[in-house]
Amino acid sequence: MAKAETYEGGPCAKGHTLRYVKGRGCVECRRDKGRGKRMFATPEYSAALRASHRRWKENNLKEYRLRGSKVNARRGGWDHTLSVDDVFWPTHCPILGIALDYSVGSRNKGGPATMAAPSFDRKDPTKAYIKGNVQIVSMRANTIKSNATPEQVARVAEWMRVFS
Ligand SMILES: [Zn+2]
């Protein structure tokens, strides 16, 4: 999330002066409120919060995937300007034909479920995550693709045909 813009304004009821540009709320009071919520969260409240996040995720799988890819892009130093409508969301991997599972995590690398996770593949890897440069493939296909050159993949395939 982008850092919210702030300004020095009139003091709040507690005498703080730093305020958010948007909504003019007091920065320190907002922070304390957030802290308090976490500190006094009951197990029931935490569980309800987790359940609500999970529900959101299940109802917004594309947005969920997009957010994950944004984190990855930022980590790699890439711009990411995609919105849900900028991406084609196939039901199956266009390379391998396997059914994609948009709800499965892609962190547990190597696990069987992980390979069905969708993965954002850039057509031109020297360009950012922008409209037209990204296609969704399976994690498995993307892993194979990113670990080798086209020639190496072809050689492995040839080897497998002959020796297995
Ligand atoms: Zn305040």
Image: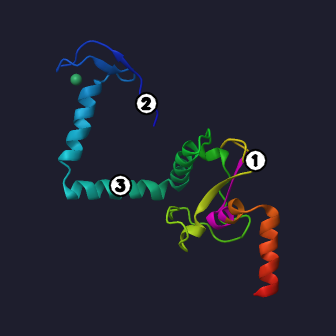
Which callout, 2 or 3, points to the residue nearer the camera? 2
**Residue in the picture at 55% in, 49% down:** 72
Label whose residue precedes the other's in the sequence (2 or 3)? 2
Position of the N terminus, as image quadrant, is top left
Q: Kindly tell me whether mark 3's CB lies below 8 Å from ligand 1.
A: no
- Which region shows up in magenta? 133-143
- The CA span between labels 2 and 1 is 30 Å
State the residue position of label 1.
124
Q: Is residue 136 magenta?
A: yes
Mark 3: which secondary structure? Answer: helix
Position of the C terminus, as image quadrant, is bottom right
- The CA span between labels 3 and 1 is 37 Å
Q: Residue 16, relative to residue 71: is it above or below?
A: above
| Relative side of 13 to 18, left or right | left
The location of residue 54, given as percent across then percent down, is 40, 58
Label whose residue precedes the other's in the sequence (3 or 1)? 3
